[in-house]
Image (spheres, helix red, strand yellow):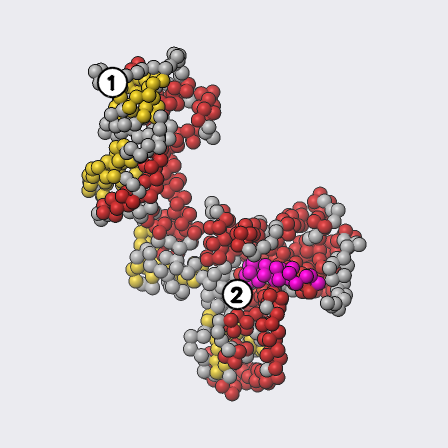
Amino acid sequence: MTKQKDTTTLEDLLKRTDHYIKDLDERNEIIKAYHYAEEAHRGQYRKSGEPYIIHPLNVAIILTEIYADKESIVTALLHDTIEDCEVTEEEIEQEFGPTVLKLLRGVTKLSRIHFSTENEYLIDYYKKIIVGMSEDVRVIIIKLADRLHNMRTLWALSPEKQKRKAKESLEILAPISDHLGIHKITSELRDLSLRYLKPTAFYDIAEKLNKTKLERDATVSTMMDEVSSLLSEHNIVHEIKGRAKSIYSIYNKLNKGKKFSDIYDLLALRIFVNTEQECYLALGIIHSKFRPLPNRFKDYIAMPKANMYQSLHTTVFGVDGYLFEIQIRTYEMDEIAENGIASHWAYKEQKDASRLMQTTTEQKLQFFKSIIELSKEQLSSEEFVQSVKEEVLNNNIYCFTPKGDVIELPRGATPLDFAYKVHTKVGETTVGAIVNNNIVPLNYELQNNDIVKINTNKNSCPSKEWIYMVKSTTTKNKIKSFFTKNEKEVYLERGKYALEKELRKKKISFHDFIQEDNIKTILKEFKLQDIDEMYYNLGTGKISALSLIRVIYKQEEKPKLIKIVKTVEGASVAVDGIDNVKVQLASCCMPIPGDEIVGYITKGNGITVHRTTCHNLIHLDERYLDVHWMSEGTSKKYLTSIVLYTNTLENHLGDIISKLGSLDAQVDEVKVMHRESLVIEMQLLVRNLKHLEKIKIELLKFPYINDIERVYR
């Protein structure tokens, strides 16, 4: 298949920049970049047979349509030089500066990703492309322009590659373009994608549009005249255009079961006025003559979309009973609607374009901010993509603070999501919520346009139950982070205290013990990263203070003969150097297989096995014996004691015991204590330490259980 030869030139690019890039130095920089790229690509041709320079030149021209800045246009001209030519990063930085090099690196990085819409690749693709965007929004805008020109020349590729590229564009790049508010690129990407993915449907719709074009044009023209006369009578200076419906949007409606004849917004007008006030005046005037269709009015001026889109939408019964979709906006609103965030700064002349572009993005584009927030969360690739799909690329809801600020949230969000979106500190100190002047529970599902007031108390803190009450992944992770941080601090303190206490027993100076050489020895022995990890492991009971002390103050070891004996409970314990002696497990600390243990010689009662952290082992070093478990895999069960701290006075004991039964743990004894909330002490029969840890993990999933501790008697 052949196409007409592309005759685009540098002069075409410069004409496109005349009205908004006026600085002579900047224009010379664009000219310099063009000649540099032309020289670098000399002798290279595209699949279409055209000189390669035609591609970066067209990408740059597409960017001028959305008023991209000088750095973006220069990067567009150079975007394939590092990848496809013998050009180094050092040369680019020397010739065009660090900003262009940064943008070029970003575009090159995205180009190197193997694009695929198959599930196994989609996850990593989404994550890489969107996190890549967070470095500088201009990178993704250049990439979108690059893809659009490639889609325009897709006819030169094989049918298989055409479909693959079209699918990528439709499912991945077009949604991002849409949420950046770049309507021109989004609409063309979708139409071109449909043309190659569903050619029969595409050409069928195009044919139907052509057949009805004369009739539609006549009807639209009559309606335009009537509306224009009406507005002029009321002295509103305006401009009216007929608006074409994209083939892809028609395809979407047909795909949902609508008939072609039922798609009422094929007849559409767009009205431009000078001020926001005139938008509302024009709306009222039009409604006074043409009856509006119920439930079809949308005010995106008072409640802009996340991508800064603003307009009034209404559908009215127009001439001859036809339904017309009418959009009313100012010229500035139209620039932003068509060209995205870039046009916001371009519309205001005499300003630093690149700086304002970035500032506007960070301040007003909640979509972009949401992506950055999500990319900082410690999420798996799958969680990240699911969050992007559900919370960012979906139809979100918009709620208001009492002052009228708009907060964007995922559908299904609760007042807690709202509070954390306002500020993390607001979320952490939330004690209640009022929605539309009514008190609501914290798990209330917010609706579009709700006015939400959050009540806070500086002395309050989050509840673990909140994790199950929020929708946003970001909110969930902020709540988890609060508990992880606080629990870690508690364990660090607990670990340090445990070490100090054990050292006092041994009459060893804490200051002397934590000398740098000693700490290095301990970290190496226990494979720990730093002293905080040492304290954390002490605090959680993973290692004992006694075992740390023994590493530094090793006793002279004697030859040992290991004998295997059976304890009264039936656990296999190895006792060093002693045979035929009675061995039993201590009832005070209730050791179970997997615990660090030590033997203690009791007078007339053989050897008692204690956990090394047991508080009853004070000043008895001379009667210690080294012992260790020989098997943790036995089906025998051992007694241990735990305490469950809850955040409620409601008795959930039945659920807890049922859960323990399903986890193959037998309850031997239960005590329930009423304090500010229920505290439950249980004696359980478990197989080993791993079994106990699994039980703790599963029980902590109950929203009313705050903490679980193993106890000593």
Q: Position of residue 342 (x, y in %)?
A: 60, 60
Q: Find out whether the residues at labels 2 and 1 contact each other: C-beta distance under 8 Å.
A: no
Q: Residues within 10 Å of mark 1 (few under 14, many from 20)?
A: some
The mark that comes first in sequence, 2 or 1, is 2
Number of the front mark, 2 or 1: 1
Q: Which residue is labeled 1 in the image? A: 606
User: Looking at the image, which is closer to me, 643 or 241?
Assistant: 643
Q: Which residue is labeled 2 in the image? A: 309
Residue pictured at 70% horizontal, 48% vertical: 82
- Label 1: which secondary element: loop
Per the rendering, the mark at residue 376 is none
User: Left or right of 637: which side holds 91?
Assistant: right
User: Left or right of 444: which side holds 551?
Assistant: right
584 above or below 159? above
Image label count: 2
Amino acid marked by disc 2 = Tyr
Q: Position of residue 72 (x, y in %)?
A: 66, 55
Quadrant for the N terminus, please. Answer: bottom right
137 above or below 298? above
Quadrant for the C terminus, please. Answer: top left
Q: Which residues are magenta?
A: 156-178
Amino acid marked by disc 1 = Gly
| Visible residue check, residue 467 | yes
- Label 2: which secondary element: loop
Q: Position of residue 459 (x, y in %)?
A: 31, 45
Residue pictured at 74% horizontal, 49% vertical: 85
Question: Does residue 359 show up magenta in the picture?
Answer: no
Residue pictured at 44% horizontal, 28% vertical: 531
